Amino acid sequence: MQLYLAQWRARDEVPGLEELVKPPPVLTPLLENSAVDLYQTSFFVGPSAAVTPLHYDPYYNLYNVYASSAPSAHAKHFVLFPPSLSEYLSRADDGSIMRNTSPVELHLRRTDDGEFEVGLDEGSAPARVRDAVRGSGLSCVLREGDTLFVPRRWWHRVENVALREESTSGGGWTAGVGWWFLPRGA
């Protein structure tokens, strides 16, 4: 059995962790000058192949890959879609508490050259959605120490990945920290 801790508020729960895990340098002066309000700091710790499904957040996010079991072998893959695709990615207004999570399922495939290709599960989306989304995603791999800015209301999916084929069976892990914030007056 594998465990994936998602949205764990470790800085609030583990004494001393606040001194160890600091905000990304770009965020620090904004916090010190009260230019932004920090909504939440969340940890995401899990093994290779752990997935956070396609969703959007109501806040800006600076996501930092804080640590991994082997920095040259394990990382996090992000794919992002702009809010302009919300009409295709949104869940029907069915009263679900997961309104910000898309029913569209994506998957990663490793190409022959070792890169990652994002695919769409055809059973999770009608043809009009597949056509609208195809080629619209922005994709990147974050390694230990890397930080990504995720704009407010942008759709994103995150998967822990093994960077080399031989690393997939090694049980590696990554730990990331999301810093969710809003500018004052937003």
Image (cartoon, helix red, strand yellow):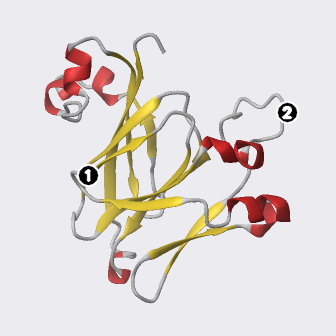
- Residue 126 seen in this snapshot: no
Residue 178 against residue 174 in the figure, above or below: above
Residue 126, quarter of the rendered image: bottom right
* Mark closer to the chain start, 1 or 2: 2
Q: Which residue is mark 1?
A: 146
Tell me which residue sits at (23%, 35%) in the image.
Answer: 24
> SS class of the residue under badge 1?
loop
Residue 91 image offset from top left, x and y in percent: 77, 41
Number of marks: 2
Residue 179 lies left or right of residue 83; in this view the side is left
Q: Is residue 164 above or below residue 52?
A: below
Q: Residue at x 23, y 30 (%)?
A: 23
Residue at 82%, 28% in the rendered image: 95
Q: Where residue 129 appears, x then y in whole percent?
A: 78, 58
Residue annotated with mark 2: 94
* Residue 168 or residue 176, whichever sits in front: 176
- The amino acid sitting under disc 2 is Asp
